[in-house]
Image (spheres, rainbow, N blue to C red):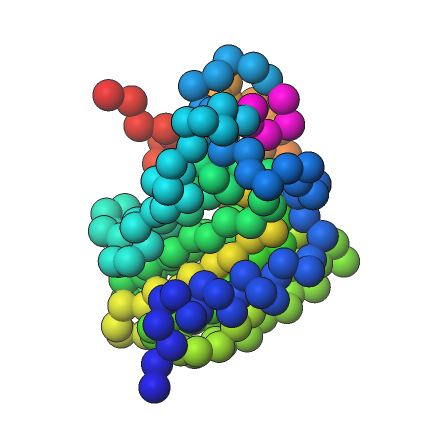
Amino acid sequence: MAMSLFSTSLLIFSIISGVLGDPDTLQDVCVADTSSGTKLNGFPCKDSKNITADDFFFAGLANPGVVNNSVGSVVTGANVEKIPGLNTLGVSLSRIDFEAGGLNPPHTHPRATEMTFVLEGELDVGFITTANKLISKTVKKGEIFVFPKGLVHFQKNNGDKAASVISAFNSQLPGTQSIAATLFGATPEVPDNVLTKTFQVGTKEIEKIKSRLAPKTS
């Protein structure tokens, strides 16, 4: 019998809770006051008199996300920005939905290790060590794969059906840096002479990539 979304999340949380992540909390709860202008490592705490159950609730992972981009995947985060009650607790989740052939492009999470549980489908996944070694595997429904903190990694649905995963992180806000978007879509732009020398290509190729990855403006 297939695991429920709740059981899956509970399993991943129980495994990842022992992995070093965000600093330990110093109180029962510290619900994030996202409206505060105070700057610190995390969010300031909301007055405990104003805490409600909704501060600890999020229904956004129950259904597949709508894929509407060129890479064929969409990430729905359940982090402190969506669940204020996660502030100082050092955990978060994401749901990633893939269309057939969809890719979650190479990226890193600078503040967290990621543990991924396959809900549906089959994915080719992998990460690259600092020795430039690719560690990769095909993972199927009900299986788990771990991406170590800070290392470049990816997930690719090579099947002809949609796929989805739940990922757990040992950080309330793991952060994501997509390699391509970071290098070619930064504002201000990374200088062309840096990119041409890095990738050993001409300016024309760099400008073509930038035009496709530049942030969309309204």
Instruction: Please tell me how many numbered marks the rendered image carries.
Output: 0
The span picked out in magenta is 40-44
Which quadrant, please, contains the C terminus? Answer: top left
* In this view, 131 is above or below 109: below
Q: Which is nearer the eye, 176 or 69?
A: 176
| 213 lies left or right of 60 | right
Residue that protrudes farthest toward the right in the picture:
131
Residue 212 seen = yes
Among the 4 quarters of the image, the one containing residue 4: bottom left
Seen at 51% across and 57% down, the residue is 168
Please provide percent x and percent y for residue 197.
63, 34
* In this view, 215 is above or below 14: above
Seen at 38% across and 57% down, the residue is 96
| 141 lies left or right of 22 | left
Among the 4 quarters of the image, the one containing residue 103: bottom left
Asked if the stretch drawn in magenta spans residue 3, the answer is: no
Please provide percent x and percent y for residue 112.
62, 48
Asked if the stretch drawn in magenta spans residue 42, the answer is: yes
Q: Which is nearer the eye, 98 or 2?
A: 2
Which quadrant, please, contains the N terminus? Answer: bottom left
| 108 lies left or right of 80 | right
Q: Which is nearer the eye, 1 or 54?
A: 54
Please provide percent x and percent y for residue 22.
66, 43
